[in-house]
Amino acid sequence: MNRRLVSYVLLNIFVSALVTGTILFFYDRSQRGGSATPGDVPTAALSASTPVLQTDIPIEIISITGAGTLGSEVALIRYGGADPVTLTGWRLTDSQGNSFTFPSLTLYEGGAVQVNSTSGSDTVVNLFWGRSEPVWESGDVASLFDAQGNLRALYRIP
């Protein structure tokens, strides 16, 4: 009887681990869009006037989740440099020209900030765009520009 119980428990652990791993695998695949490079962005989104991606500041748009649902839309931006970077005046834009301008904000090594499409009260880690309708959609390209208008990051929404 004990041998049968142990076999059942081991089988249960194996099946649970397999199911959990499968769910996490597919969740990761559906949520990961990754930062785009100009070669990853559809040519329709790029034109002759598209600025060259500047990579001297290690900042990237990590993800945009909840595309199409105003209360869920969040863009996550992470900084990977050692020296602080001031985002004051930087702009996050979509392919249709909608633009969010960053207020006075400094990111430090490993720092990140979320830009929520909806309204709310800004904090050091959550900023709010104040839109009344969603801005992002699947296939859209998000661009991050510094205060001088240099393109710093691209992200294609899966």
Image: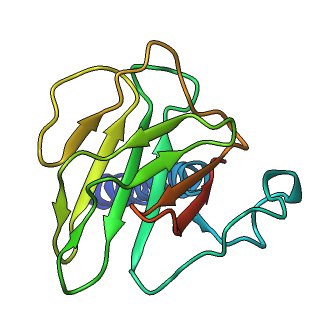
Residue 57 coordinates in the image, percent (x, y)? 39, 81
Residue drawn at x 58%, y 33% is: 136
Horizontal side of residue 85 vs 101, given as left or right: left
Residue 21 in sight here: no
Residue drawn at x 38%, y 51% is: 76
Q: Tell which of 22 and 124 is nearer to you.
A: 124
Residue 135 coordinates in the image, percent (x, y)? 55, 28
Query: In the displayed structure, would residue 57 be above or below residue 9?
Result: below
Query: In the displayed structure, would residue 96 be above or below residue 139?
Result: above
Q: Residue furthest front?
A: 148
Residue drawn at x 17%, y 48% is: 125
Residue drawn at x 15%, y 26% is: 121
Residue 29 in sight here: yes
Residue 60 coordinates in the image, percent (x, y)? 44, 67
Q: Residue furthest left?
A: 123
Horizontal side of residue 95 vs 49, given as left or right: left
Query: In the displayed structure, would residue 114 be above or below residue 87?
Result: above
